Amino acid sequence: MDERFGIENLAELGGVTRRTIRYYVQERLLPPPLGVGRGRHYGPEHLERLLFVKSLQEEGLPLAEIRRRVLEPNSAEGALDLSRISRASWTRLTLLPGVELHVAGDVRLPPPSKLGELSEWCRRHFRRKEDVDGND
């Protein structure tokens, strides 16, 4: 099976933006897309590399160290361990500025009226630090 991804699909699957994909290609963290012009696409190896880069970032490694590991794939620490990478679908709801609710993809969302009630509860019970400091 010949899997091909457009930049939008690759970004979505990798949990990043299209801009991040372009930056990673520029920084040689990802290989350039295949094809030319409107036929440009990415393959499974791009997604695998993208997930590897993200896993290293989540460990707190700087881009210079990630680049070294990507460009030296024969080093033990540069080997891709797919068992360390977990993918899950989440819905992110902004209840008010600074307060978000993250809901796993397999959890059914409540009706909009109930989400409105939750948002109102958050407005009453969450205060920004500057609001609290200004009222003392």
Image (tube, rainbow, N blue to C red):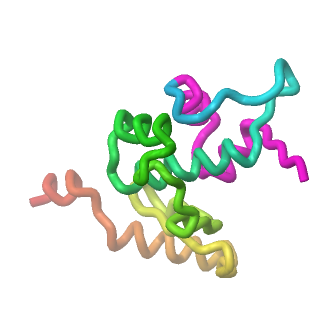
Q: Which residue sits at x=53%, y=51%?
A: 52
Residue located farthest toward the left when viewing the structure as drawn: 136
Q: Which residue sits at x=23%, y=55%?
A: 131
Residue 6, magenta (yes or no): yes
Residue located farthest toward the top when viewing the structure as drawn: 37
Q: Left or right: 34 with respect to 96? A: right
Residue located farthest toward the front when viewing the structure as drawn: 74
Q: Left or right: 30 with respect to 67? A: right
Inspect this view and state whether residue 102 appears. yes
| Nearer to us in this view, 14 or 99 | 14
Q: Which residue sits at x=41%, y=52%?
A: 77
Q: Left or right: 94 with respect to 134? A: right
Q: Position of residue 74 (x, y in %)?
A: 49, 45
* Total numbered badges shown on the rendered structure: 0
Q: Position of residue 82 (x, y in %)?
A: 57, 63
Q: Where is 136 relative to 36, above or below?
A: below
Q: Position of residue 96 (x, y in %)?
A: 46, 59
Residue 15, magenta (yes or no): yes
Region in magenta:
1-26
Inspect this view and state whether residue 90 appears. no
The quadrant in which residue 67 appears is top left
- Screen quadrant of the C terminus: bottom left
Q: Which residue sits at x=73%, y=40%?
A: 8
Q: Position of residue 90 (x, y in %)?
A: 61, 66
Q: Main secondary structure of the magenta part?
A: helix
Residue located farthest toward the right when viewing the structure as drawn: 1
| Nearer to us in this view, 13 or 118 | 13
The quadrant in which residue 45 appears is top right
